[in-house]
Amino acid sequence: MIAQTPKPPYYAVIFSSVRTPVDDGYANMAEKMVELAGQQPGFLGVESARNELGITISYWNDLESIKQWKHHAEHSLARDMGRSIWYEQFRTRIARVERDYEFFKP
């Protein structure tokens, strides 16, 4: 599903990852993180896809909201588990969205 975001500017946190073969609760944790992020001030939406490379993009009102999410206790635990169990490699990028174009067939 494509996230419905407001008129720019806003911010995107782009999380690209390569998984290990270990699943061990990954799907449950990922679902919990999306639910929890949705409860945070400044959260606008999320989009995610996974094949060999996983990409999750979360959208936020401002940099302070992103910082607060980064330091959220449960999110910190999930990040630690990702480093030790679930990910071979990952990278997080933060970008300011200046333009937003939409197309859909009616």
Image (cartoon, rainbow, N blue to C red):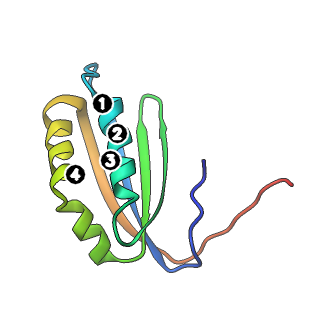
Q: Are marks 2 and 3 in contact (CB under 8 Å)?
A: yes
Q: Which mark is residue 64?
A: none
In the rendered image, residue 13, in percent from the top left (x then y), is placed at 37, 61
* Mark toward the start of the polypeptide (1 vs 4): 1
Q: Which mark is residue 26?
A: 1
Residue tagged by mark 4? 75
Corner quadrant of residue 17? top left
* Secondary structure category for the residue under label 1: helix
* Secondary structure category for the residue under label 3: helix
Kind of residue sitting beneath label 3: Met
Q: Which mark is residue 30?
A: 2
Farthest front residue in view? 39
- Image vertical order of residue 48 relative to residue 98, above or below: above
Give neighbour class at mark 2: few <14, some 14-19, many 20+ (Cα, 10 Å): few
Residue tagged by mark 3? 33
Kind of residue sitting beneath label 4: His
In the rendered image, residue 44, in percent from the top left (x then y), is placed at 47, 66
* Secondary structure category for the residue under label 4: helix
For the residues labelled 1 and 2, the Cα–Cα distance comes to 6 Å
